[in-house]
Image (cartoon, rainbow, N blue to C red):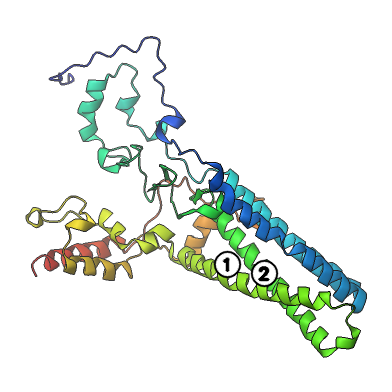
Amino acid sequence: MSRPQPLLSFEVDTSGQDTSLKYDDFDSEVRRSWYHYLPLCLLLLLMVAPYPSLFIVLVNHYLRTLDNPIAFVIHFLVIFTLKFLAFVSLMVCVARDPGPVFFNASDQDPIDQREDMGLAEALMTMGSTDDDCSPDKFCRKCWVPKPERAHHCSICGRCVLKMDHHCPWLGAKCIGHRTYPAFVHFLTCITAFSAYVTIISISAVRWSFNNPLLVLDQATPVHELLLAAAGVIFTLVVGSFLVYHIYLITTNQTTVEALSPFLLLRYIPPLPASMKLSDPPMEEELSYNQRRVVRDAHRFVRMYDVGWRRNWAQVFGWSKPQGWIYLLLIGGTGNGDGRSFPRNPRSQEMLSQLAARLEKGSLK
C-alpha cells in the first residue's frame, strides 16, 4: 500500500548540518549561580560542626575520666562510620543526575527509524502512534517525552524521571529515580548519627551531674549539653522526614504524588463528552464538588502500590550479587529504567469508580 501524499511538502536543506538528536536538546537544565550552593555549604558545615565537641567529650569523659578505652573506641567507630556513610550518600545525591528524560531509539516506532523519512511523513504518522512520545505525553514546558511518573521541575527547568521533590539543600537539585535511594540513605544515616550522639551525650551529662567532683573541667559538661540539645533537635527534624519517606516507600508514592491529588486525573478513563472537559480533565475545569471527590479518592487510590515488599524492592532492590554493598554505602539502586512501573491491580477499578463519581458530581 502506497504512502498517502501530504497536502504540504517541506523542503529543508540539512546539508552540512548535524541533525542527530543530542542529550542536551531534550534535557537542558538551568545553570546554577553561586548562591544556589549556599544551602549545601551550610549543610556541610552543620555536618562537621559537632566533631570538636564530640572529640572533647569522648576523650575527657570516656577515656580520661571513666578510663574506658573500649567504650571510647566503640563510640568513635560508630560515630565516624555513620558520618562517612552520610557523606557518601550526599555525594551521590549531589553529583549524580536524578533521572534524565531523553529520546531512546528503542522507544521509537520502527517507521520513525527509517533514514528516508521526511518531516511531513513524520507528522502524518504521529496520530497513529501509541507510545511515550505521543503528543499527549510530551512536557508542555520543555517539550521532551514525559514517561510515567516523570514531572517537570520549574526551578531546574527540566523533567525528572520519577521526581520526588526539589531539594535546595543538595545543591539545588531534584531527587528522582536515580538518587532517591541515596537520599533516603542520607536521612537514615543523619538520623542514626544524631540519635547516637544524643544517647552518649545525655549519658555523659547525667554522670557529670551525679559526680560533679570527678569532672575534669567545667567545659566538658557544656559540650555535653550542647551535643545533647543539638542531637535531640536533629533527630526530631530529620527523623520526621525519614518517617514520612518510609511511609511513601511503603505505599509506593513520591512526595509530588502524595501532595498532588489531582494527578489522578491523568489516569482516569475518558469522561462523557457532555461534561465538556478536557481529556484528561484539568483541575480548574472541575466544580467544587468534583474537586472534593478527587481529594477524597486520593486518600485511597494508590496507583503503584503493589505490596510493601515489592514497593521497597523497587527503591532499594538490586540485581547484582554484590548489591548489598551498594545498599550499605549509598542506599542501593532503584530497579527498572524509571520510565514504566507496575500498577496496583485494583487501580483501574478504583479509577473507574472515580470517573463515575465525577460524572455524578457534575449533575449536582
Q: Is residue 258 above or below residue 168?
A: below
Q: How many numbered marks are there? A: 2
Q: Check disc 2 and report its element: helix, strand or loop.
A: helix
User: Residue 248 placed where, x, y %?
Assistant: 46, 65
For the residues labelled 2 and 1, say whether their Cβ atoms are less than 8 Å apart.
yes
Quarter of the image for residue 200 reads bottom right
The kind of residue tagged 1 is Val
Residue topped by disc 2: 194
User: Residue 179 placed where, x, y %?
Assistant: 54, 50
Query: Which residue is more in the foreground, 333 or 109?
Result: 333
Q: Quadrant of the N terminus?
A: top left
The kind of residue tagged 2 is Ser
Q: Residue furthest bottom?
A: 210
Please tell me which residue is depicted at 59% across the width and 62% down the height of the picture.
187
Query: Which residue is more in the foreground, 204 or 178?
Result: 204
| Relative side of 302 to 200, left or right | left
Q: Residue furthest front?
A: 218
Residue topped by disc 1: 238
Please tell me which residue is depicted at 58% across the width and 50% down the height of the picture.
38
Q: CA distance from mark 2 to mark 1?
A: 9 Å
User: Residue 89 placed where, x, y %?
Assistant: 63, 53
Can residue 324 be seen in this snapshot?
A: no
User: Residue 302 placed where, x, y %?
Assistant: 36, 64
Q: Check disc 1 and report its element: helix, strand or loop.
A: helix
Q: Is residue 160 above or below residue 309?
A: above
| Relative side of 211 to 2, left or right | right
